[in-house]
Amino acid sequence: MSKFNYEDWDIEPELEIGNDDFVFGNYVDWDRFRQDEEENLLSYFDIKLPWGEELYLSEYFEFLRQEVFQNTSIVEDWDLDKLEITTQSNIISEMVIQFPTRKESNSDEIISAVFDYFEIPSGTEYEYELPEKLQYWHNMLENDYLESEYENYRKYPLKFGTYKKTMSDIELKVSNTSDIMTKKSLILSSFIISESLLKSAIVSKIPKETAISNFSKEILSTEIDSRLRGNVGKRNGLFKQLFNEKVPKQAWVNLRNSLAHDIESATVQGNEISYISLIDDNEYTVNFDNLFKQQMDFYRELQQIMENDDESTK
């Protein structure tokens, strides 16, 4: 049986945008995709649905012999085995059966069942539910943003005001949605944003060298980029070198790594998320309110360090 392969289709995810035009990520409305591409999908899987046609008995049997109807109960479920005979005849081969039209009430369910058989997604999938190639953040990292994070954060730093508004927006979305995967995706997005705030702070402290060759600039940029993209220890070490202060506590790092490694492994119950730590394989449970409080404490402490640093350099 052939299955749906998203790579065979020109799928354009939509952006989920919050305050200050911050992009939370992509999402795909698969139900709309099914609707817009219905004819093309049926053709792709070579499915013949003779809507509104009158079929000789041989044509009707040919319809029934299609793989999807042989391997499912669609025909029985939607009474396609009880169609009206519009032309009676003593010769069986001359009998004519009326196939329902596409506008009849159960036609949508028939199409949906056919698409389900070929594993075409349905509903709405958000950033971290989507295949990587359809994810907004994955594509950003795979393309220009990972070519030089240092250059990216130098040109487009995440401002404290934007961070505060965005985190407030994410917290509200987590509280208002009942979809578990959406909650987990938003939580992971909040960690990525907090990471971006730290990287922006680090890059803001690095002086722009003008009196060195392009070759030396390239080496400097590569080294800084390596530390920004490295593990938590590398970033924290670079921060300590630049500000002579420890990085504010980032208590969510283990949860962030667990979600990034396998977002489906975490479980959500009520206002809490449980996950398996990649460090010790133990399960931990964290309250959503505490997660956002930790990140806002991180934001305030980081802002204070930078303000004190500005005062000391005057």
Image (spheres, rainbow, N blue to C red):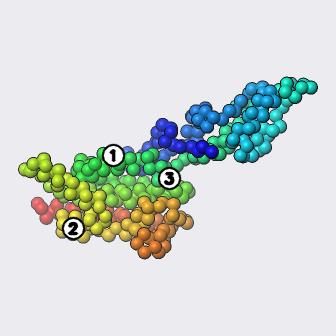
The secondary element bearing badge 2 is classed as: helix
Q: What residue is shown with label 1? A: 143
* Label 3 – label 2 distance at C-alpha: 36 Å
Decide if residue 266 is on the left or right side of residue 308.
Answer: right
The secondary element bearing badge 1 is classed as: loop
* Label 2 – label 1 distance at C-alpha: 29 Å
Given this view, does label 3 or label 2 mark the residue nearer the observer? 3
Q: Which mark is residue 129?
A: 3
Task: Find residue 76 and report its image quarter.
Answer: top right
**Residue positioned most to the right:** 90
Q: Which mark is residue 5?
A: none
Whether residue 19 appears in this view of the structure is: no
Q: Which numbered disc, 2 or 1, marks the residue that appears first in the sequence?
A: 1
Could you say which is closer to the camera, residue 209 or residue 296?
A: 209
Q: Work out which quarter of the rendered image holds the N terminus and state it.
A: top right
**Residue positioned most to the left:** 211
Q: Which numbered disc, 3 or 2, marks the residue that appears first in the sequence?
A: 3
| Residue at the image point whose x is 66% and y is 41% from the top | 114
Could you say which is closer to the camera, residue 140 or residue 190?
A: 140
Q: What residue is shown with label 2? A: 240
Q: Amino acid at mark 3?
A: Glu
Q: Work out which quarter of the rendered image holds the C terminus and state it.
A: bottom left
How crowded is the residue under tag 2: few (<14 C-alpha within 10 Å), some, or many (20+)?
A: some
Task: Find residue 178 and report its image quarter.
Answer: bottom right
Could you say which is closer to the camera, residue 61 or residue 234?
A: 61
